[in-house]
Image (spheres, rainbow, N blue to C red):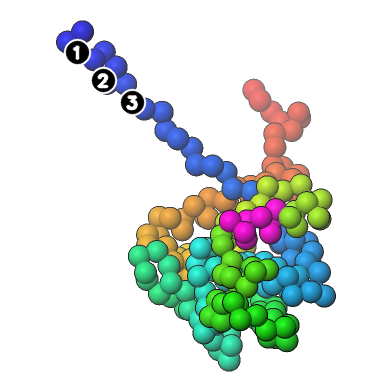
Amino acid sequence: MSTNPASLVSYPHRTGRRIEYLTVDDVYALLSLPATGTVPGLRDRAILELLYSTGIRVGEMVSLNREDVRWDESTVRVVGKGSKERVVPVGDPALKALISYREALDRSPSDAQRDKEALFLNVRGGRLTSRSVNRIIKKYILIGSLALDVSPHSLRHAFATHLMEMGADLRDIQELLGHESIATTQKYTHVSLDRLMEVYDQAHPRSKRSEYDDTT
C-alpha cells in the first residue's frame, strides 16, 4: 500500500504505575521492625528512618558520605539529578538512628577494607547499593507480614503525600524532593485529593445517594 491507513490513529495513553499508598500507621509499623541489637539492624533502622524523614531518592541515599550529614544542624547535603545539590532537613528520630548506627559501627572490630567515607555499608564493609536497600525493605515487609508492595520510592512517596496532607506548601515539597518542575510534584495533590475523597465517602452520611433520594 502506498499510504498508511493507521497514520491518523492516536496511540493509547499509558497510565503511570500506581504507587502503593502508605498511611502514617503503615510507615510506623515498618520503621519499628528492624532489631536494634546488631549493627545491621541499626543500619536498617537508620535507612528506613532517613528515607521517610527526608524523601530523598534511594540512589541519593546510598551515595551519601558521612561528611554529608551535618550532625549539629540536623540536615543532609544531597547530590541529585544533574549533579544538583540541595540541603534537606533530617528529623530527630532519623538523626538519632543515624548516630546510633555510626557509633555502633565505629565500636565494631576495625576492618582495613572498610569504606571509611560511605554513610551506609554492606556486611563486607563496602558501600551499600540501591538494589541492596530494596532487598532490605522487602525483607522487613515479609518479617512484619505487611500486606504491602513497598519499595524505597514508596517511602519517598509517603514523605511527600503526608506533608501535603498536613498542609505543606507545594513549592516547599518540590524543593525538598529536588524536582526540576512543579508539575512533577503536583501528582501528590491528586493523591491527597483521592485520599480525602475516600475518607469523605467513608465518613459522611450524605456522601452517596440514598435510596430515599428524590430521583424524579
Which segment did they paint magenta?
131-138
Above/below status of 97 relative to 154 = below
* Image x and y of residue 171, in percent: 44, 67
Q: Farthest residue in the left direction?
A: 2
The spot of residue 27 in percent (x, y) is 71, 61
Q: Amino acid at mark 1?
A: Thr
Amino acid at circle 2: Ser
Q: Which residue is mark 3?
A: 10
Dot 1, how many residues are within 10 Å of its Cα: few (below 14), some (14-19), or many (20+)? few
**Contact (Cβ within 8 Å) of mark 1 with mark 2:** yes
Single out the mark in the foreground, 1 or 3.
Answer: 1
Residue, disc 1: 3
Q: Secondary structure at mark 3?
A: loop
Number of other residues with Cα within 10 Å of mark 3, as a class: few under 14, some 14 to 19, many 20 or more: few
Residue 134 on the magenta span: yes
Give 60 or 168, whichever is nearer the viewer.
Answer: 60
Judging by the rendered image, the residue that carries numbered circle 2 is 7
- Total label count? 3
Q: Are marks 1 and 3 in contact (CB under 8 Å)?
A: no
Regarding mark 1 in the picture, which secondary structure is present there?
Answer: loop
Q: Nearer the viewer, residue 98 or 192?
A: 98
Which secondary structure lies at badge 2? loop
